[in-house]
Amino acid sequence: QWLERIRRLSIHKTCRNVEKSKRFSHLRSLFTFGVADMPSKLPISTLLSGVPRLLKVLDLQGAPLESLPNEIFELYLLRYLSLNGTRVKKIPSSIGRLVNLETLDLKHASVTELPVEILKLQKLCHLLVYRYVKRSPPFHSTYGFKPPLGLGDLPSLQKLCFVEATQSSDILNEVGKLTQLRKLGITKLRREDGVA
């Protein structure tokens, strides 16, 4: 019965002893830390199938994920989603269903572009999509993402890192529409765009 009262669950290093359970009826936050031994018989999707749709925080940092389980897109109240350090390369169009999402953390994953459906996330405040690649110390390269056209239509965006300015004039115009923006990271700016 105590499982029914849990509101916050943290899983450290292993998922092997976590059952598929529908008893987490009050769960609001789920975190994973250093989970590296995800067996094929117990993927994250199995764990999520027992999680209620009331979940607001889902932090899968470092989990050995290569794609997003469909169950994530049924978590309509989700406000915070972190895939930091996962192997995820592509964000599906279903991301547009998470209309209450405020933070999307894709740092150090392998995502290089986002679908146009990201523009449906009108409450999104923090969009973090980048990774560092080490070069000769102390130098490193920063890789960002190619945003969809219309990025300026996200009225709540406060933190945006790192946008690739491959279509500089369009990107800079879109960024100029983000009136709530407090922190901005841009890569691949050209000299003609004001870079010395």
Image (cartoon, helix red, strand yellow):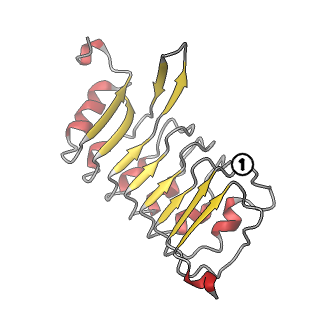
Q: Position of residue 64 (x, y in %)?
A: 68, 48
Q: Position of residue 103 (x, y in %)?
A: 40, 54
Question: Tag 1: residue type?
Answer: Ala
Element under disc 1 = loop
Residue extending furthest toward the left: 179
Q: Is residue 7 above or below residue 187?
A: below
Residue at 49% from the left image edge and 72% from the top image edge: 28
- Residue 135 placement: quadrant: top right
Left or right of 41? Residue 12 is left
Q: Which residue lies under the disc numbered 1?
A: 36
Left or right of 133? Residue 13 is right
The quadrant the N terminus occupies is: bottom right
Q: How many marks?
A: 1
Res. 117 visible in picture: no
Q: Position of residue 188 (x, y in %)?
A: 38, 21
Residue at 63% from the left image edge and 67% from the top image edge: 48
Left or right of 8? Residue 101 is left
- Residue 49 placement: quadrant: bottom right
Decide which of 134, 159 is in the foreground and name it: 134
